[in-house]
Image (cartoon, rainbow, N blue to C red):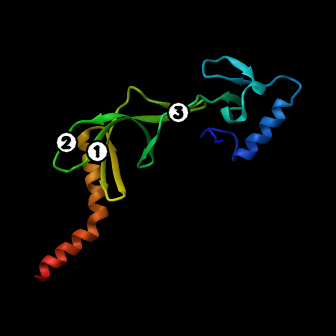
Amino acid sequence: MSLNIYSEFKNVDEKLNAYTKDIKNPNTVFAEKCDGTRVPLKDVSVENVDRVGDLWRVQTPFTQPIRVVRKKEFVIAGKDNFTDHTGFLYYRANPVGENCYGKFVFPSVEYVVAEFVAGNTVYDAYGKTRDDARAYLALKVLDAFQPVIQQAIKSQRQK
């Protein structure tokens, strides 16, 4: 069980206690759906509701896998078949947002996620264009491999 980012509760125990209290209320307490219709709270499981703005709201199920890149959530829309000399892989991705009814995808907003795999480590970055994503990822990879590069330079100078 999780909390909506706009939830009135600080933790799931608070949510469970409020839910239990409200379903025992002799006056019917309702939960609002994203289409504006209302259903009795007792007909919705605690995992599928949250209280936002002093109303119980049915959370829209979100089943798509989320990829977090630099603290931003994305849903990968597909692989970009572009190849270049860097060995980076590129993906089309849509950002994930969240409102009082749960997470959703911005379908009309598209980013590019660039990825580089070295051993068991995956480096990634995103940008509005492939060039932006490649530039951010190149800097990230350069930072990660800086000690190796410095050692190679030092060894070359000692020859």
Residue 67, x across and y down, in percent: 43, 43
Please name the amino acid that badge 1 sits on. Ala
Q: Nearer the viewer, mark 1 or mark 3?
A: 3
Q: Return the residue found at the far front.
A: 119
- Residue placed under numbered mark 1 in the picture: 133
Amino acid at the residue labelled 3: Thr
* Front: mark 1 or 2: 2
Amino acid, disc 2: Thr
* Distance from the alpha carbon under mark 1 to that under mark 3: 26 Å
Mark pair 2, 3: CA separation: 30 Å
The single residue placed furthest to the left in the displayed view is 159
Q: Residue at x 22, y 72 (%)?
A: 150
Give the label on residue 63, or none: 3
- Return the disc, 1 or 3, that comes first in the chain's sequence: 3
152 vs 26, left or right, is left
Q: Which mark is residue 83?
A: 2
Percent of width and height locating residue 113: 33, 42
Q: Secondary structure at mark 2?
A: loop
